Amino acid sequence: MRANVLSRSVLRWIHIVISIPIYGYIYSPFEKLPQYARPTRFVFFPLMVLTGLLMWKGHLLWRLFPKRPA
C-alpha cells in the first residue's frame, strides 16, 4: 500500500512538472511558437498523457504482472 502511494505521488509530480512547458506553449507569444512546437508535441505532451493514464488506470496495468514469490 505504501509503495502505491509513493508511486502515485511521484507520477503526480512528474505530471505537474511536465505540464508546465505545455502551459508555456499555449500562452507564449505567437512568434515563439515554432521554438516550443517540436518538444511540446513529441516529448512533453506524450509524457503528460502517459503519466495521466498511469495514475488513472495504472492499477489495471500492474495486475497484468504477477508478483514474484519470495
Image (cartoon, grey):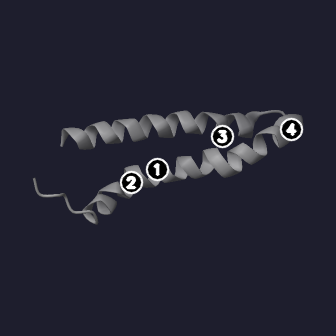
Which amino acid type is shown beneath numbered disc 3? Answer: Ile
Question: Residue shown at 36%/58% (left/top)?
Answer: 57
Determine the CA span between mark 2 and mark 4: 33 Å
Name the residue furthest bottom. Answer: 64
SS for callout 4: helix
What residue is pinned by disc 2?
56
Question: Residue shown at 50%/53% (left/top)?
Answer: 50
Determine the CA span between mark 4 and mark 1: 28 Å
Which amino acid type is shown beneath numbered disc 1? Answer: Gly
Q: Residue 52 has which mark? A: 1
What residue is pinned by disc 4?
30
Instruction: Report if the CB atoms under discs 3 and 2 are less than 8 Å apart.
Output: no
Which amino acid type is shown beneath numbered disc 4? Answer: Phe
Q: Quadrant of the N terminus?
A: top left
Q: Left or right: where does residue 17 sit relative to residue 10?
A: right
Q: Earlier in the sequence, mark 4 or mark 3?
A: 3
Which amino acid type is shown beneath numbered disc 2? Answer: Trp
